[in-house]
């Protein structure tokens, strides 16, 4: 797999964790009201819109979000590299817990992130672990667990730091496309072209930035579908280079529905990994 394609998975992580969280603080535009989710934010009527205006709408829309269900898929061409879905809880614009499932090499893997810890359970498949959860930490002996723990910690921290707003506000240009339906819900579609050189986020490591630079990738096109409250329902980016195409697709549904995420019982956790 080319390094720049691996980098798009990292960018997808930024969307995954922080699309529901605070979308940044724009350098211009109105301040959100004390209860912004109670009414739709004003939306520019013209096709031309600034990245700051989009970020302002999203900031107002997600201010009162406490939970969401998400689905995330990364593809290289037609091959699915990563697919996961699950729930997340938020407070004050920060991701405080995640409960995700993904299928990998025939195994269905469930991952919990809560209270600063990450737990992994292979629900079914050749490597099923039954009721046993494995604690993944930055000091794990197993390199896979160590990498997973670092990725989750970085993603949560970046979500809390308004990572998605960083991407939107680093856009060179933006456009309002029109109104479409996403899973039966009316949504306004926007396109932005993100200038990678202006993005300062821990999710884009030096290695990822170098790989994309070597592939000649300097911008990332993002398509965003926002509901009437300014909340993202769908986000898609498609990057083409070296004769290959990588696509990240994130959908968000079930805003503010009851979600409970708890750490597994201590007796069921293997801490020796």
Image (spheres, rainbow, N blue to C red):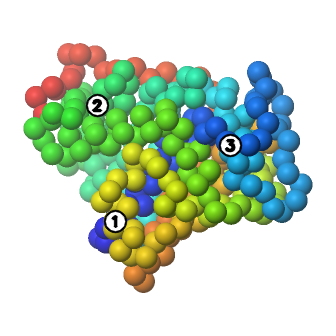
Instruction: Say if mark 1 contacts mark 2, CB within 8 Å.
Output: no
Residue at position x 30%, y 60% from top? 207
Q: Earlier in the sequence, mark 3 or mark 1?
A: 3
Is 109 or 239 nearer to us in this picture? Answer: 239
Residue furthest right in the image: 45
Q: Quadrant of the C terminus?
A: top left
| Residue 237 visible, this orientation | no
Q: Earlier in the sequence, mark 1 or mark 2?
A: 2
In the shown orientation, is residue 207 left or right of residue 144? right
Which tag is nearer the camera, tag 3 or tag 2? 3
Residue at position x 71%, y 61% from top? 174
Q: Which residue is mark 2?
A: 119
Q: Earlier in the sequence, mark 3 or mark 2?
A: 3
Residue 235: x and y, percent? Answer: 60, 54
Q: Residue 27's mark?
A: 3
Which tag is nearer the camera, tag 3 or tag 1? 3
Label 3: how many Cα within 10 Å (few below 14, some 14–19, many 20+):
few
Which tag is nearer the camera, tag 1 or tag 2? 1
Label 1: how many Cα within 10 Å (few below 14, some 14–19, many 20+):
some
Is 42 or 142 nearer to us in this picture? Answer: 42
Q: Residue 210's mark?
A: 1
Counting the numbered discs, the total is 3
């Amino acid at each position: 797999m080319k390094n720049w394609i691996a980098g798009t998975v990292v960018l997808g992580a930024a969307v995954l964790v922080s699309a529901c969280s605070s979308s940044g603080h724009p350098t211009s535009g109105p301040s959100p009201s004390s209860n912004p989710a109670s009414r739709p934010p004003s939306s520019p009527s013209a096709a031309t819109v600034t990245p700051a205006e989009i970020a302002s709408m999203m900031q107002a829309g997600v201010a009162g979000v406490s939970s969401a269900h998400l689905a995330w898929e990364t593809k290289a061409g037609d091959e699915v590299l990563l697919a996961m879905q699950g729930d997340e809880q938020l407070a004050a614009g920060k991701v405080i817990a995640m409960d995700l499932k993904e299928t990998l090499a025939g195994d269905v893997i469930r991952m919990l992130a809560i209270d600063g810890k990450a737990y992994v359970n292979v629900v079914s498949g050749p490597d099923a672990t039954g009721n046993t959860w494995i604690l993944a930490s930055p000091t794990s002996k197993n390199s896979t667990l160590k990498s997973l723990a670092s990725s989750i910690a970085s993603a949560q921290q970046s979500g809390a730091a308004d990572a998605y707003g960083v991407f939107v506000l680093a856009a060179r240009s933006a456009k309002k496309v029109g109104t479409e339906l996403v899973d039966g819900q009316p949504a306004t579609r926007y396109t932005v072209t993100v200038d990678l050189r202006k993005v300062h986020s821990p999710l884009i490591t030096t290695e990822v930035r170098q790989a994309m630079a070597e592939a000649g990738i300097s911008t990332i096109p993002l398509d965003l579908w926002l509901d009437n409250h300014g909340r993202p329902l769908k986000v898609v980016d498609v990057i083409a280079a070296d004769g290959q195409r990588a696509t990240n697709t994130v959908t968000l549904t079930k805003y503010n529905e009851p979600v409970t995420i708890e750490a597994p019982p201590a007796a069921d956790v293997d801490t020796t990994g």
